[in-house]
Structure formats: structure tokens, C-alpha cells
Amino acid sequence: MKTIGVLTSGGDAPGMNAAIRSVARTGLQYGMKVLGVMRGYNGLINGDMIELNMRSVSDIINRGGTMLYTARCKEFKDMAGVQKAKETCLKAGIEGLVVIGGDGSFRGAGDLSSIGIPCVGIPGTIDNDIACTDYTIGYDTAMNTAMDMVDRIRDTAQSHDRCSVVEVMGRNAGYIALNTGIAVGASYILVPEIKPDIDAVIEKIEKSRALGKKHFIVVVAEGIGHAKEIAQEIEEKTGIESRETILGHVQRGGNPTVTDRVVASQMGYHAVELLHQGIGNRVVAQKDGKIVDYDIQEALKMKKELPMELYKVAHDISF
Ligand SMILES: Nc1ncnc2c1ncn2[C@@H]1O[C@H](COP(=O)(O)OP(=O)(O)O)[C@@H](O)[C@H]1O
Ligand SMILES: O=P(O)(O)OC[C@H]1O[C@](O)(COP(=O)(O)O)[C@@H](O)[C@@H]1O
Ligand SMILES: [Mg+2]
């Protein structure tokens, strides 16, 4: 391949820049022309792209967000949009494309691959909710940010003998909630994968209160929501003054951790190796510590479950 494109799509995630840098530098080393497509699939439909050289990806490895911007592009969900994107690719000479994003972005990459533009997906989302991979770029940074924020909340909850209900991101996935919850010693963790049971939360708080505990942290995933109502119910039923905090987009920003930078660098490299061999319609993944790749359609059919043993450990040791 003489020319490849790279784009970021869906929610941004810390480490996406490190992946862009890796894709660009690997491609350039192979003598390829590398085009950075702006604002996800929008840039592909509108022909909005910039040529990347070795220096244009300098000083981004340490930065959150994405230098190529990102978007959720409705038009690309229809084949007409995908067809337009293909025409842009043909015009610009793009023979292969790296798509950094989540499962939605991979569906689009599969569609574009099916009409003759080979695409390789790189999992980039803070949610870690992509079934084919043990790890998604941005996840570690997001969890560490959430943990830092809850540590701060703990200081004030402790000083006031309060209960803090903290909502972390994760629309459909409880990975951030589970790991942050265990890392901050939460009394209870509510995740979208398990039907919420407020009575169980209250029972747990009462149990540890009987053992002398005076301040409590409950972590709630965004998919469960209702942090305010949960805090109110805890206060009403236990008499413990309660406050809710929704962490929100603070979890999506900031400098990527070492894990996110390393995995992003490895995955970007692997993606371009595939395109260099003329291989498309693949998703790069991390499996048991190794970088591997899967057919996009097969990857999208895979299922991943929240580690229930970890959920049990979290609750068995929080008193
Ligand atoms: N079924 C689909 N077919 C084609 N493109 C899709 C599809 N679903 C999502 N996309 C494209 O991928 C973009 C990102 O998807 P989204 O689900 O929002 O985020 P993520 O990739 O993080 O899961 C969408 O805005 C759209 O352009
Ligand atoms: O920034 P938005 O559009 O409000 O989206 C919020 C959602 O994006 C995420 O931060 C990341 O999700 P994606 O990577 O799948 O886009 C979710 O945790 C959250 O539910
Ligand atoms: Mg998604």
C-alpha cells in the first residue's frame, strides 16, 4: 500500500494520540504516505484530511484527547455514507485505513472493508467494553483518574461522616466501576451487568456501620445512573448524610498512563503491519498479554463478561 489513512471515532480516549503517532511513524517507515482523517468518518465523507509526517505527530504521546478530533457520524451508518467515504478514499489514493474507536466504529470499518477499502480497527474507548480484546486504549487512564477523584471525595466524606455515591462512566459496561470501586474500597459497586439492589447496598452499609465504620463510598456505573436518588434513599433509610457526585467527562481527559501509551504504540504498529501485508477487515486486540488480530465480523460477535470473581472479592473485603 502506498497511502493509508488514520482516524479516531466515537468517544475520545487518552492514548489515542499515542496510537496515531505509532500508525503514522510505522507507515512512514514503510515509505507510505499517511493521511490523518479529521473528525472520524465525517472527514472521510467530506474529504477533510491532513498529511502526516514524522514531526506532525511529535509531542502528542503524552497528551489526552485526539489530535485528529473525533465525532459520532450519523451519515456513515447508512451504506450511502460508506459509499461516499469510499469515493473520497479513491480520490485521495487511500488504499487502507486504520480506525481507532469502539465497536460502533468497527461496524463502520467492516462496512467500508466490504466495499473494497481494507480497514483495521484499534480498540480505543475508556469503557473497555470491546469483547475481542482484554484491553482498550484509555481504560487505565480513566480508572486512575476516577480513583484519584474518589480519593479526594473520601477525604471530605470521612471528615463529615457521610456516604458518598459516585457515578463513574460506562453506559453499558461496569469495568470502570468495578475496578475503581475495588481500588477505593467502596462499600458497594453497582454495575449495569447486575440488576441493582438498593436494599443490598443499605444492608452492607449497616453491617459495616455496626463494625464501627462512619463514612461510606458507593460506586455507581453510568448505566445504572440515579446517583442522586440512590444517595437520597441511603440517607432516608440509614440516617447517614449522603451526597452524590457524577464524575463525568473528567474521566475521559488527561495525560495517558504508561499502560495506555505502551498498548497504543503496540497496537498502532500491529495495525500498519497488517495493512502493509495487504490485510484488512481486522481488529487488533490484546489477548493474554499478546497483540493479536481478529476478523471484524467475528470480533463483533464475541461476548465478554465482567469478572464476577473480582466483583465478589470487592464486596467480601469491604467492611
Ligand atoms: N452500525 C454501524 N454501521 C456503520 N457505521 C457505524 C455503525 N455504528 C456506528 N458507526 C459509526 O461509528 C461511529 C462511532 O460509533 P459509536 O457507537 O458512537 O462509538 P464507538 O465506536 O466508541 O462504539 C458512529 O458515529 C458511526 O459513524
Ligand atoms: O461524550 P458523550 O457523547 O456524552 O458520551 C458518553 C459516553 O462515552 C463514553 O465515555 C465512552 O464511550 P465510547 O468510547 O463507546 O464512545 C461512555 O463511558 C459514556 O457513556
Ligand atoms: Mg462504544
Image (tube, helix red, strand yellow):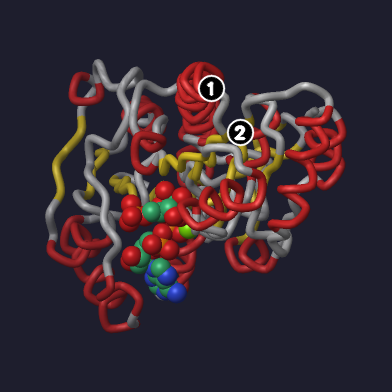
Q: Classify residue 160 as left or right of residue 308.
A: left
Residue at image mark 1: 154
The residue labelled by disc 2 is 217
Mark 2 element type = strand
Would the CB of label 2 be found within 8 Å of ligand 2? no
Please indicate whether residue 277 sits to the left or right of residue 95 in the image.
right
Q: Determine whether 207 is above or below 77 in the image.
A: above
At x 66%, y 38%, the residue is 286
Q: Identify which residue, 240 or 138, lies in the foreground.
A: 240
Is disc 1 in contact with disc 2, using a CB cutoff of under 8 Å?
yes
Which labelled disc corresponds to residue 31? none
Ligand 1 location (quadrant): bottom left
Q: Is residue 144 visible?
A: no
Return the residue nearer the eye: 289 or 96.
Answer: 289
Q: Which one is in front, 298 or 161?
A: 161
Of the two numbered discs 1 and 2 on the same chain, state the one appearing first in sequence: 1
Q: Residues within 10 Å of mark 2 (few under 14, many from 20)?
A: many
Residue kind at label 2, given as amino acid type: Ile
**Label 1's element?**
helix
**Mark 1 vs ligand 2: CB below 8 Å:** no
Residue 183, percent across and down?
66, 25
Residue at image point 56% right, 19% down: 158
The percent position of residue 195, horizontal first and vertical second, equals 72, 64
Q: The C terminus is located in which quarter?
A: top right
Marks 1/2: CA distance? 7 Å
Vertical comparison of 195 with 25: above or below? below
**Total label count?**
2
Which quadrant of the view contains residue 240? Answer: top right
Q: Position of residue 280 (x, y in %)?
A: 51, 56
Q: Amino acid at mark 1?
A: Arg
| Residue depicted at x 48% and y 46% | 169
